[in-house]
Amino acid sequence: MDLAGAVAMVTGGADGLGAALCRRLAAEGAAGVVVADTDREGAERVAAEVGGLAVAADVSSEDAIAGLVRQSEDRFGRIDVVFSNAGIHRGAHPFAADETFDQLWRVHIMSIVYLARHTLRGMLARGRGGFVVTASTDGITTSTGDMAYAITKHGQVAAAEWLSMVYGTRGIEVSCFCPGWMWTGMTRPYRGRQDVPVSIQMAMSRAVSADDAASILVEGVKNGQFLITTAGDTARDFRHKARDFDGWIAQLQTWHDTVQPEVGPER
């Protein structure tokens, strides 16, 4: 997909990968960048940097997304590519509150539904467009510490796959970004700490910056890739899982019992 001259919308654009992505899109020559986030001030800062439009929006709400799309189209006339990037993490397990699961479901899954519902008709009418979902390596392997995150990140991959299947031959280019650990607002509190679990230490050892992740994502989108990752070990793990699912589960069980036995409290 050619991003030069495109109008791009980025949710979760006020910080981390989203902010880096907005800057990279502007550098690619995007005709307009919409910076959407619940953090209005952060969105305004990034929009001022890139000459874009800042919109305060909670992507878990369809009304908010409908308003986001209206404001974007009022400013730029169209939306050519959506980067569904907003995400949260809550450390959920089976005994966590229902509200926690519902919150991740709405932010990670329903936001994709709402964004597609309110942008695809325009793209289809023009015969071209793009839809990019930021999932996680946890969406094709799993999260070792958060049940709700694992469920909804897998769901994001499935949603992107479905959109590509249905709309890919109708001019809509779909990509799914499955990065490993990135240095963002979500992960920044762990930086430099020595008292973190072994699993997090291992993830941090392979971390990339938000700027590097944004570059990898944009290059993948420009090249028409569906699955885009930040490290080769993600694809390796995916192949391992596909070849021997029982072995994969056994490996995860050993990982849990050795490295994270505290995950999954009994009450």
Image (cartoon, rainbow, N blue to C red):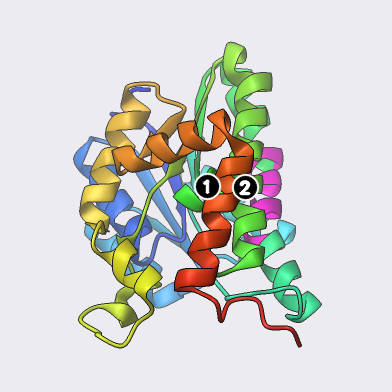
Which quadrant holds the N terminus? top left
Residue 51 in view: no
In the rendered image, which residue does mark 2 sit on? 154
Is 230 on the left-hand or right-hand side of 237? left
Residue 160 in view: yes
As measured in the structure, the alpha-carbon distance from the residue carrying label 1 to the one carrying label 2 is 8 Å
Rendered view: 92 above or below 74: below
Task: Tell me which residue sits at (33%, 67%) in the image.
Answer: 184
Contact check, label 1 and label 2, Cβ < 8 Å: no
Pick the residue in front: 70 or 228: 228
State yes or no: residue 111 in magenta: yes
Prevalent SS, magenta region: helix
Q: Which amino acid does label 2 sit on?
A: His
Q: Earlier in the sequence, mark 1 or mark 2?
A: 1
Residue 141's label in the rendered image is 1
- Disc 1 or disc 2, which is closer to the eye? 1
How crowded is the residue under tag 1: few (<14 C-alpha within 10 Å), some, or many (20+)?
many
Rendered view: 186 above or below 213: below
Pick the residue in front: 228 or 257: 257
Q: Which segment did they paint magenta?
A: 106-117
Question: Residue 101, percent across and down?
Answer: 73, 69
Question: Residue 171, percent across and down?
Answer: 55, 16
Task: Tell me which residue sits at (31%, 64%) in the image.
Answer: 202
Task: Tell me which residue sits at (49%, 62%) in the image.
Answer: 255
Pick the residue in front: 123 or 144: 144
